[in-house]
Amino acid sequence: MEFTEIYCINCRKVLGIYNIRFYKEDKINELMKSSHALHVREGHHIVTRKFEKTSL
Ligand SMILES: [Zn+2]
């Protein structure tokens, strides 16, 4: 399964990890404007990173 991780460089923490199947790029952008708006408003630098996770 593939995931998108939203990471705030200023806070040095992961804000959320979202399954790509349910959260496409536009949904991620939406989340950044809603759930993580506080960081955006503070002028924090937020990056997204895709990674793959295999469940056994
Ligand atoms: Zn932040």
Image (cartoon, rainbow, N blue to C red):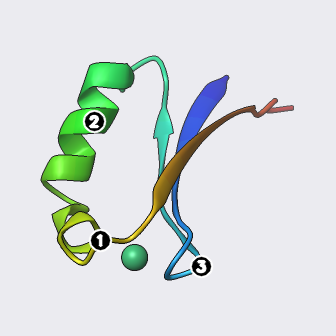
Three-letter residue code for mark 2: Asn
Please tell me which of labels 2 and 3 falls first in the chain: 3
Q: Determine the residue positioned at 25% across, 64% down.
A: 40
- Disc 2 crowd rating (10 Å Cα; few below 14, some 14-19, many 20+) is few
Secondary element under disc 1, as helix, strand or loop, is: loop
In the rendered view, would you say 41 is above or below 18? below
Compared to residue 8, the image places residue 29 above or below, namely: above
Mark nearer the N terminus (1 vs 3): 3
Q: Position of residue 27 (x, y in %)?
A: 26, 28
Which residue is farthest bottom? 11
Marks 2, 1: nearer the viewer:
1
Q: Position of residue 36 (x, y in %)?
A: 25, 62
Disc 2 and disc 3: Cα gap in Å?
Answer: 19 Å
Question: x and y percent of residue 43 in the render?
Answer: 29, 71
| The C terminus: image quadrant | top right
User: Label 1 sits on what residue type?
Assistant: Gly
Horizontal side of residue 22 vs 42, given as left or right: right
Report the residue marked by disc 3: 12
Mark identifier at residue 43: 1
Q: Which mark is residue 4?
A: none
User: For mark 2, what is the residue?
Assistant: 29
